[in-house]
Image (spheres, helix red, strand yellow):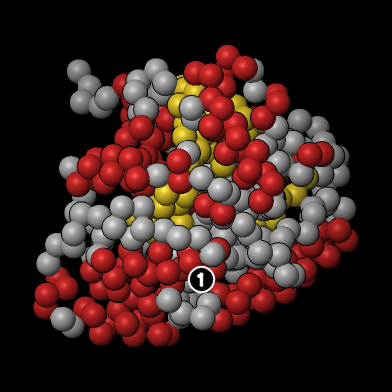
Amino acid sequence: MTFVSDKVSSLPPYLFAAFQKKKLALEEQGVDVIDLGIGAPDLPAPDFVVEELAKAARIPANHRYATYSGSPLFREAVADFYKSHYSVDIDPNTEVLALIGSKEGISHLIQAVINPGDAVMVPDLSYPVYRSGVHLAGGEAIQLPLDKDNGYVPMFEKVAAVDLKRAKLMFLNYPSNPTAATVDLNTFMEAITIARGNNVLLAHDAAYDLITFNGYKAPSVMQVPDAKDHAVEFGSLSKSFNMTGWRIGYVVGNKEVIKALSTLKSNVDSSQFLPIQEAAAMALNSDLSAVEANCLIYTERMEKLHKALQEVGIDAEKPKGTIFMWAKVPSGYSSSAFANKLLDEAGVIVTPGTAFGPSGEGFFRIALSVPMERLEEVIDRLKQLDLKGLTT
């Protein structure tokens, strides 16, 4: 007899957890492993945010339960951010919900809006939690094609009409994890048109909305007229303010969906620790100069690594956003074989593209998540590798 449910036993292991296990094993053998796999910023959270957390944590009343939808202060800060950054009006009382990180919110959203057997359009390539969330909710994932030659913009025309009609939910993510692709507002306008015409809810994951380079500003799906009738958008402070472990995010948009997600979450969690919400509110209300400083650091790292990849014969485009670079594996390697070679022979962790969908074969993802001196060590190790001669 087993005590494990079918949905969990049939769930593939989370790839990043598997790499971390191998990393620990190598480190125990004395290997100096440099981890460019998981997207965890190495930069510190801003001092003013940490100080606000400490200040709020000293207030006894803040150690009680938060309201299920999140503190009014945090929800108002999210609405103010949308107004100041995107010129979009968001009702903090009905169109914002605090999350314990957007990863949690995405997984719970799927459970809140689909029934077992319902179809969900998931980009190929995409953050693995979209697919695992659909699996856990008993849904069916339909591939939404993306292609390098098309700039990884969603190719709605390649989704069968019958699949569009039976889909209940659709995910997009720009700036994109893993491809670092970016889009303009026209892409979201097309997506909203598709959603409206097929009665599909659009869920846009904007976790990297503020991590952009060289003058590019990522649009919000909420800037599309009447977007709130057909969409929700997830935001996170994890990457923009280096607050991954704080687990604080939000979702905005359609009132009915926000209410449904709030109802589900009130039965499984009690919102985030109030001092974290207060500190996050201060971050969102800031002038974003701390985020701009982060972006300059990532830009410098990206330029350095891009040049080095070119020198060793690895093809990668310069991204306009995210903390990632998306690169082609050298000729003669599969994604998995190349990732394993880097780990075994150079002590460098990257993520094979197949972790993000079938179209990831032939690619790998690099996180710009180590200081420059460690990145230079990565470059030295790459230059010492023999990248020729392997057949898959």
Q: x%, y% of residue 23?
A: 51, 54
Residue 40 seen in the figure: no
Q: Residue at x 51, y 56 (%)?
A: 207
Q: x%, y% of residue 326?
A: 71, 50
Please give left or right for residue 329 compared with residue 40 in the image. Answer: right
Residue closest to the eye, 360 or 49: 49
Q: x%, y% of residue 201?
A: 47, 34
The amino acid marked with disc number 1 is Ser
**Disc 1, SS:** helix
Quickly name the residue at label 1: 84
The image quadrant that residue 86 belongs to is: bottom right
Position of residue 43 relative to residue 272, above or below, is below
Please give left or right for residue 366 compared with residue 111 in the image. Answer: right
Q: Residue at x 60, y 65 (%)?
A: 211
Residue closest to the eye, 263 or 377: 263
Label 1 packing within 10 angstroms: few (<14), some (14-19), many (20+): few
Q: Quadrant of the N terminus?
A: top left
Position of residue 332 relative to residue 252, above or below, is above
Residue closest to the eye, 366 or 297: 297
Please give left or right for residue 112 compared with residue 59 in the image. Answer: right
Q: x%, y% of residue 213?
A: 70, 67
Q: Residue at x 70, y 32 (%)?
A: 155
Q: Residue at x 47, y 38 (%)?
A: 230
